[in-house]
Image (cartoon, rainbow, N blue to C red):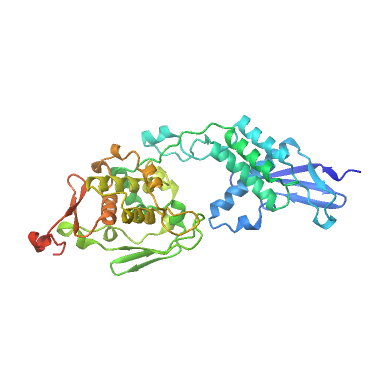
Amino acid sequence: MSWIDVLGTYATRKRATRGHQHVLYIKHKGSAWAYSEDTLQAPLHQFAHRVSTSNSRRCHINAFLGFAAQQNLPLLLDLQVPPRMRKPCFSYDQVWAWAEHMVLRKKCKTEQSDSDSYGKGKALFFPRPQESHASQSNYVQGLVDALTLKGALYSPNRELRKVGILAAKLALPAETQRQAPLIDRSAFLKLTRACPSMLAFAALGWRISAFRAIPMISQEQQAMTFSVPTQKSCGSNIEPLTIRCQCERYHAGERCSLCSMPVPRVDTVDYGTLKRFGATGHSPRRSLAVAFRVVGGDANVDFDDEHVVTTINRRMMWFRKGTARPAKGLKMFNRYSQDHTAHPQHKLPLFLLKVAAELLRKGAQRIFVDKHNNSVQLLNVNKRALGPRFTGRQ
């Protein structure tokens, strides 16, 4: 007597926002099941802190169901399980066959714009997808996670899972990592005129998903406080970030970054606006990192100093895994700013140079802005020697 029944399926699909949504229907001795991206997504995944995480999982499930419908994959029913708990299951072999199909048909894509368009400064509203071994493993791992939590994977096995996911990851060659394009001073001026909220987005240096998810912004006298949304890499809530007025630290009455930007409307910051000016969602973040490196380099800032490390990592939200404490080193910062020598101050937005100077300033240092040469300098100044004209107060 067999302990496993092999069940046939039939499928339907309907037009969705992106592509088609696939649904598998299974019938067996008076019982019926419907598998879709909704029914196969575990509640734990639906409660993900970031909506994009849940949406990615749904995409992975739907892609697999499309393959299952195309190939007429049979499902397995374990008769040893009590009747009320029985559920049709997919097998690991079917998951690996799907991974092979993605490799051979080049179905696994990311949505990164191709690098040629960056150099030409053109906006791509429909970026050409790129093959990615990281995306390949994400698809397979996301599917296996979903099927396991929903009890729709036959005989889960830790070792088999590990070997299969690794094989899927290595099936494609490692892609060359591309840096997001920097925003130069001219493009930044046009961008911030089109969307003034981009000033706050660039000053914070956060990911666009984090910026758009800011729950509350409070404005006080000479200060603006941003509540920090929950981050999936942090094990606890992050303290709000406050930006304070630093006009008194500037030479000759120059306005600080806070006094140069309006209270942002986070919903106005979007990918479409950035793409219109040849930028991506990561461009302001990387531009700020390069500004840190350039301004700090010109001022002989010690980037090994613990205070400097903490300041940069806190602002850019690079934390130790599972905590809300800033990372110890500058690994991510060094990666973001590795090409800083190709971007001297006169090419970068003056606003970002001022943000960097304000955060790197120490003790009696004052900030000198040269608008003619588009540069910012941190200098140690004796206020008594200069007199009241240089205090920043009129």
Which is more toward the observer, 236 or 264? 236
Left or right: 255 as drawn, with respect to 184: left
Which percent across, then down, holds residue 291? 30, 47
Which is more toward the observer, 157 or 232? 157
Q: Is residue 15 visible?
A: no
Which percent across, then down, holds residue 49? 54, 58
User: How many marks do you count on the picture?
Assistant: 0
Residue 175's place in the image compared with 190, above or below, is above
Give the quadrant of the N terminus.
top right
Residue 161's place in the image compared with 267, above or below, is above
Give the quadrant of the C terminus.
bottom left
Residue farthest top in this picture: 104
Which is more toward the observer, 180 or 334? 334
Residue 54's place in the image compared with 247, above or below, is above
- Identify the residue at image location x=34%, y=56%: 311
Residue 181 figure quarter: top left
Q: Is residue 18 visible?
A: yes
Residue farthest right in this picture: 1
Left or right: 42 as drawn, with respect to 343: right
Residue 105 figure quarter: top right
- Identify the residue at image location x=18%, y=44%: 373
Which percent across, then down, holds residue 50? 53, 55
Which percent across, then down, holds residue 86? 81, 53
